[in-house]
Image: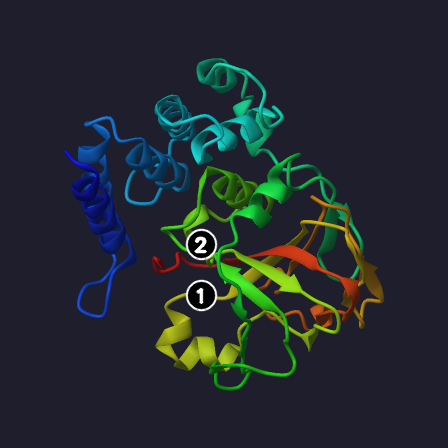
Amino acid sequence: MDKEEHLARLKEADDWLRGSEERPPDPVEAVARLEDLARTGSAPAMLRLSALTAQGLGRRQDWSEALDLLCAAAERAPPGSVPQRQLQILAGVPAGAATEMRDLRSNIDQDRLLTPPRIERLSDISMVAAVRGFAPAGFCEWIISRVNVLAPAHVAMMGTGEVVQSAARTATHCVFGATTRDVVMAVMMERASRLFGAPIPNHESPQVINYEPGQLFAPHHDWIAPELLANDPRFSNRGQRMATLVTYLNDEFEEGATRFPILDITFRGRPGDAIVFSNVQPNGVPDTDTLHEGAPVKSGRKWVLSQWLRTQPQPVFG
């Protein structure tokens, strides 16, 4: 097939994955279309399938197959391409290293890659912890490089759930939906899942958040108000936001720490370090002590990856 037809078929698969006002997302149909393209030798189709297989989206989750698909895409792609660089990062090899793709694939220690480091409790009152090296080497730079468009970040009003732009949150963000997540991001999701015992489908779409000088996120809670969960299908169908993970992606900024004023915790991670916390108590009741803020950045540019896990599977977002 020619390039134009190939791109059109990739777009059709993404449209099925993303859904529209007239048609809900259908990951299974998207996967079927990508599999047809992959059989023709399409590296982009293999690349998309690798991420979906890693997440278990539209097909059974299988990390070995996901890595094999990524390797197959890398073998068909030009030097320095997205699939090749991802494979290098997963294998812990520097960019530009002259290594055969199959050698990289065979050198990936899957268990080590997917198992999160141990947690370091920071509070005896609430489950707030540091996870040093939550993002493996090379992940932080890669995730920042994948940000395409930054948009103003919004907040959800605690009483109504209405999402609005607010002076309480002045940073910008980039949401990684089903059509933009890759295998590197899927590893971050899998590590979070294993940390809290919640499967990848219970993830909200991860967000990379950017803070420039003076930007902040004022003190707030991440849990969903119980009255909304009880009475509003928009929230009851998606479950409580049980846990939050914030991974620091860089350190070229001043101040801008994550603070928990009630618990008297201030956390400033090095690149790859994460602050993780449960938004609810073991009985499911919101933990009001987890009030937290992203303090203003004094200078430089702060990048973090925010991940939230719910008690129920989430809708597919493009």
Residue type at the position of mark 2: Asn
Residue 305 screen position, x and y as percent: 60, 54
Q: Residue at 61% x, 26% y: name it.
A: 92
Q: Is residue 132 shown to the viewer in this render?
A: yes
Give the x, y percent position of residue 94: 62, 26
Label 1 Cα crowd, 10 Å radius (few <14 / some 14-19 / many 20+): some
Name the residue carrying label 2. 202
Whichever of labels 1 and 2 marks the residue nearer the N terminus, that label is 2
Q: Pointer 1 and pointer 2: residues touching (CB < 8 Å)? A: yes
Q: Nearer the viewer, residue 111 or 271?
A: 271
Which residue is rendered at x = 48% and y = 19% of the image? Answer: 105
- Spatial CA span between label 1 and label 2: 9 Å
Residue at 22%, 70% in the rendered image: 21
**Viewer-nearest residue: 90 or 267:** 90
Q: Which residue is drawn at 55% across and 43% down?
A: 188
Specify whether residue 256 is in view: no
Q: Where is residue 230 in the image (x, y as percent from the top left)?
A: 43, 78
Q: Badge 1 is on which residue?
A: 239
- The residue type indicated by label 1 comes to Gly
Quadrant in the picture for residue 272: top right
Q: Dot 2 lies on which element?
A: helix
Whether residue 151 sits left or right of residue 303 in the image: it is left
Secondary element type, mark 1: loop
Task: Tell whether 96 sits left or right of 148.
Answer: right
